[in-house]
Image (cartoon, rainbow, N blue to C red):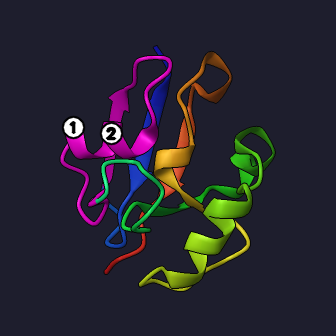
Amino acid sequence: MPKVTWILGDGREISAQVAIGHNLMEAAVANNVPDVIGECGGCLSCATCHVYVDPAWEAKTGKPGEMENDMLEITTAERKSNSRLSCQIVASEELDGLVLHVPHL
């Protein structure tokens, strides 16, 4: 199982092993990561699971799809070039060590 680390706005880190095939919003909620809410349950309709992908991992997580890109326009925190909705990032062996930064709401 790949390890994912969420870095919070205050510098604290939360790390967890995530089962392959699970999206990272589900993993964040299951591990009580603050400010990753996932109100829509991963249906790509709320943007409450917004994260910033660490620059070292941007190429491996890919770019947002069209619907995700539209949803990123309504995030509470500032949208950046490395913004993603964590419900659209799926755990895989290639993402072992992934670092996500959580915007403070």
Q: Residue at x 46, y 83 (%)?
A: 77
Left or right of 30? Residue 57 is: right
> Is residue 18 shown in magenta?
yes
The residue type indicated by label 1 comes to Ala
> Is residue 85 shown in magenta?
no
Q: Residue at x 39, y 24 (%)?
A: 18
Quarter assignment of residue 12: bottom left
Tell me the distance, in whole angstroms, between the alpha carbons under discs 1 and 2. 6 Å
Confirm whether residue 47 shows in the render. Answer: yes
Left or right of 20? Residue 84 is: right
Q: Mark 2 highlights which residue? A: 26
Query: The magenta stretch spans which residues?
Result: 13-39
Q: Are marks 1 and 2 in contact (CB under 8 Å)?
A: yes
Neighbour tally class for label 2: few under 14, some 14-19, many 20 plus, Cα within 10 Å: many
Q: Position of residue 33 (x, y in %)?
A: 25, 52
Q: Position of residue 78 (x, y in %)?
A: 54, 86
Q: Is residue 16 above or below residue 37?
A: above
Q: Mark 1 highlights which residue? A: 30
The residue type indicated by label 2 comes to Glu
Q: Residue at x 77, y 54 (%)?
A: 63
